[in-house]
Amino acid sequence: MSRIAYVNGAYVPHREAQVHVEDRGYQFADAVYEVIAVRGGGLVDEAGHLARLKRSLAELRIRAPMRDTALRHVIREMVARNGVRDGIVYMQVSRGVARRDHPFPAAATKPAIVMTARRMPRFDLRAPVTGIKILTVPDIRWQRCDIKSVSLLPNILAKQQAREAGAYEAWQVDADGRVTEGASTNAWIVTKAGELVTRSASNAILNGITRLALIAIAAKLGVRLVERSFTVAEAKEAREAFITSATSFVLPVVQVDDRVIGNGEPGSISLQLREAYADHMDEAARRSA
Ligand SMILES: Cc1ncc(COP(=O)(O)O)c(C=O)c1O
């Protein structure tokens, strides 16, 4: 099945999909995006992702490209036309096409929307998993990390630095030595006292939809959660650690820089939350049909 992309109202072959050279997303990173996981043909936490998209657009004063019902229809069309059973849908909305100039273009300028869908092998979150390594790096981003903007240069540099160091993810660290979040994931630890800790939502992090789902899951399971920041030193002393995102799900961490976490194996609370998240994904995807 050949891939189809959606570009400003048209479904086109993926290899022919193009945006205008003066799209403000292309020239200024004046655009926002969302990634929704597809599980068994259904969408995971679609409502949360669309609510966050709306918020990102509003914060940047970019108009919504279409009504919610239309957007939900296009997303489903993309899943169907690309034969996605498991994978992701990516959508990006820019302020539109206009002659290059920093101020906003005329109010009548239409926002531009593109969407892609990608098939991926089905991930079994109940299968044994080896944990990942984290590299800590300074957080050099701006003060609106709560907006899911396509302006991702610091994230890309952090991720690349991690990969070159043999780590899977980078944890970005603020000026006070506290972890903000990963390059494309939220960061969590379980302290020696058994407390689950993740940074509270603020302008310093993207409020992950997976993060929000996991907060609800932890409450249901009776896992004690504290939303607060934690230092790199605290992370290195933690009993467990893991990362979350729509595409990484709940992924255990077994090393931070040169320090092995716990006994070097994925922790029991991390694995319990990973399994519970698998159930949540299946259930949420079923409900989205
Ligand atoms: C910087 C950052 N933090 C956190 C996340 C996790 O968000 P979500 O759980 O909605 O995928 C992402 C996802 O792309 C991200 O880019």
Image (spheres, rainbow, N blue to C red):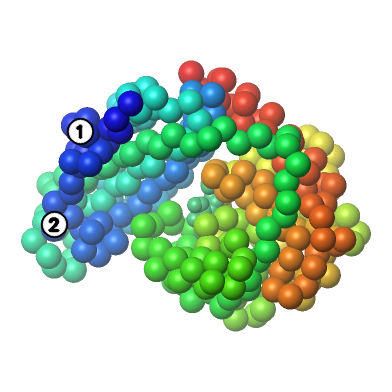
Q: Is residue 280 left or right of residue 162?
A: right
Residue at screen point 44% across, 66% down? 156
Residue 248, position as x, y percentages in the image: 59, 47
Of the numbered discs in the image, which one, if any, rests on residue 21?
Answer: 2
* Dot 2: element: loop
In the image, what residue type sits under mark 2? Val
- Residue 172: tell me if it is visible: no
- Residue 166 occupies which quadrant of the picture? bottom right
CA gap, disc 1 to disc 2? 18 Å
Check disc 1 and report the residue beneath it.
12
- Residue 94: tell me if it is visible: yes
Residue toward you, 86 or 59: 86
Residue 113 higher or lower than 164, as above or below:
above
In the image, what residue type sits under mark 1? Val
Residue toward you, 120 or 186: 120
Residue at screen point 57% across, 55% down? 185
Residue 115 higher or lower than 132, as above or below:
above
* Dot 1: element: strand
Mark 1 or mark 2: name the one nearer the start of the chain. Answer: 1
Residue toward you, 21 or 200: 21
Q: Residues within 10 Å of mark 2 (few under 14, many from 20)?
A: few
Residue at screen point 66% across, 34% down? 124
